[in-house]
Image (cartoon, rainbow, N blue to C red):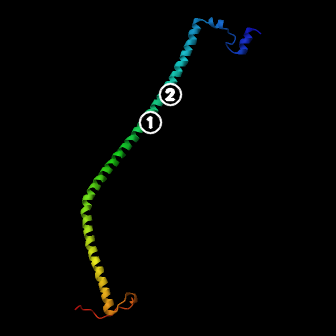
Amino acid sequence: MSSKLRSKSMGPGAGTSPAEKLKKSQGQQMKDAGLEIQGLIERLEVQVKELNISTRKDKEGLQEFDRHLGALKEEKRKITADIAAKEKYLASFEEIIKPLDDQFNNIEGFLKGHYDSAKVKYDKGIKLLEREFDYHRMYRRPDKPFFGVPFKPK
């Protein structure tokens, strides 16, 4: 086979030997180096565009984060103010309620004393009815009124 056929069947540059490559002209070497540099610059430009897009998205995300953080800080401020107001109310609540609680306890004690006295007097009255008029609680008929002679103490 001839060298022309060999180079066609193996692709371009397949038949060039290392010695032939070294023999390239200086212009061809400069052209090859320029193409490599151009390819590198194009790849770097694409990477710079991708980084710019990524940076822009990061800035937008940061702005959204700052908006959300601001809303959370405002909510924290409101909750803190609400807690402070409620703590102040609870502190004053003791001052407001304490006199009313004392008054209620006094009234409760007063009523308890009168109720206890009424129970004793009621018991004494029932015993008097039993003794003087043969009254018996178990045999009293609810549908018939109790009849007896009014008692007048001596």
Q: Residue pushed farthest left?
A: 154
Using the image as rendered, state which of residue 123 and residue 12 is in the foreground.
123
Find residue 39 and report its image quarter: top right
Q: Is residue 31 left or right of residue 55?
A: right
> Which residue is tagged 2?
50
> Which residue is tagged 1?
61
Q: Position of residue 61 (x, y in %)?
A: 44, 36
Q: Which mark is residue 25?
A: none
Q: Residues within 10 Å of mark 1 (few under 14, many from 20)?
A: few
Q: Residue pushed farthest right?
A: 1
Q: Position of residue 146 (x, y in %)?
A: 34, 91
| 97 versus 51 height, above or below | below
Amino acid carrying mark 2 in the image: Glu
Which residue shows up at 40% across the image and 41% down it?
Answer: 68
Q: Position of residue 58 (x, y in %)?
A: 45, 33
Amino acid carrying mark 1 in the image: Gly
Q: How far apart are the two marked residues, 2 and 1, measured between alpha carbons?
A: 16 Å
